[in-house]
Every structure is written in C-alpha cells, then in structure tokens.
Amino acid sequence: MYMDYSKLWKLLIDKNMTKTELMDETGLSSRIIAKLSKNEVVTTETLAKICSCLNCDIGDIAECKEENSLSLYNYYAKFGKITEDTENYKTVEFEHNGQKYKVYTIKRPVKKNMIIHLMEDGTIYREELLPFGHIMCPSRVKKAILKPVPSKSEIVIVLFSGKPNFFGIDDGMFVSAKNALKTTSKIYVMTEASFKLFNMK
C-alpha cells in the first residue's frame, strides 16, 4: 500500500490555490511538495499543516492505494532502483505485476534530424540526417548507442528524450505506446513521452 495525494492537487484547484501559495501558507519546502507530487513518504506533521491550511481532513487530501494499481510508468518512477549510471545512459530495474523490467534512459537527447534504429541482433544505433540543399539526407555514419541483452525473465525498455525523425521511433521493430509489438524481441524502444502512456497487455 502507498499514500496517493491526487486528492490534494484537485483540492488546490478547487480552492484556486497554487503549490507556491500552499508553501507560503504552510512553510513547507519545495522538496516536501516534490515528495508529495511523487506520492513519497512525508511526516504526519506535514499532513497536519496542510489540513490546517486547507481546513480539511486527511481523507480530503490523501488515500491508500495498492501498488499494483499504478501505471507502469508511475511504478517505475516510484519504485525503480538505479543499478547503473554511465556517461551515456542510466539503468533502472523494477518488477511490476510479476514481470521484471530493465529501463535504459539514454542521456543524449534525440532531435528531428535523427533516426533511431534497432537491429535484429538488438543493437540500437543513431543515424543523423544532414542537410543537402532543401532536403535532409541520411549520413553514412551510424553510431551504436547500446546493445541490451534481456534475460528470459525480463523486458527491456530503452527511452530517448526529445523527438526523433517521424520515421525513426516506429521504424522496423520499434514499438511505442500506440503500437503492438512487431517482433518476438523483448526490447521496446520509445520516447520518454510515449513511456508515460505505455501499457503492457
């Protein structure tokens, strides 16, 4: 079980109050507000200050929920553990509804002049499109980014920030929040924005 503070943010909207105003009225720090936004543990003193400020009961700002009711993205954000942090990517591992996941977040953002490819052997590489007159042409240089090797019991998700070329993210064996798995591979490649909507079926 965990405490969900969605009711608090709805109550602030109903009262036409901002998070900044709540901090001013209660003396709470931005760090505490950030913890509440992530449904992390806070003290009963913090909750009492909020209830006093908003003239409400604790049930008006929080409720207990089951962890398994969280979306995949929210579970990753709340319970994922960093197991590796390199110059090029960060690795987070977690288990959701009995399934193990390994998430690689690529640190270099992708741009509209880039295409991300996934080879049949699982290697992910980046190709940049270079301007040639009024059109964009693919360069002949392709840079390998990562070659994840999922174990039999885990699913690998590779996340990119930014927006790649339109044909990049869903090309070939790529999957995103709006597509079905196009290969028997256990590697999913998508943008961070798509991951927030992604759901394993």
Image: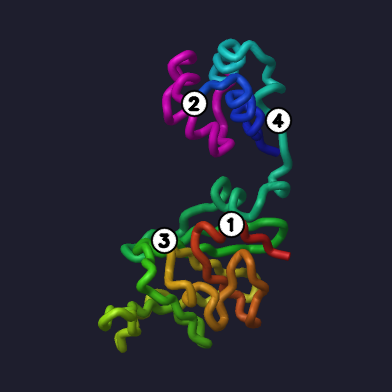
Residue plotted at (57% across, 32% down): 41
Magenta span contains residue 29: yes
Say few, some or many: other residues with alpha carbon within 10 Å of mark 3 (under 14 / 14 to 19 / 20 or more).
few
Q: Which mark is residue 63?
A: 4
Q: Amino acid at mark 2?
A: Lys
Q: Earlier in the sequence, mark 2 or mark 1?
A: 2
Residue denoted by label 1: 94
Is 10 rendered above or below residue 201? above
Mark 3 falls on what kind of element?
A: strand
What residue range appears in magenta? Answer: 19-44
Labels in figure, total: 4
Point out the frontmost of discs 2 and 4. Answer: 2
Point out the frontmost of discs 4 and 3. Answer: 3
Q: Which mark is residue 162?
A: 3
Split into 4 quadrants, where in the image is the N terminus?
top right
Horizontal placement of 117 versus 197: left or right? left
Magenta span contains residue 114: no
Q: Earlier in the sequence, mark 4 or mark 3?
A: 4
**Depth check: 15 or 131 in front?**
131
Residue denoted by label 2: 19
Q: Amino acid at mark 4?
A: Glu
Magenta stretch prevailing secondary structure: helix
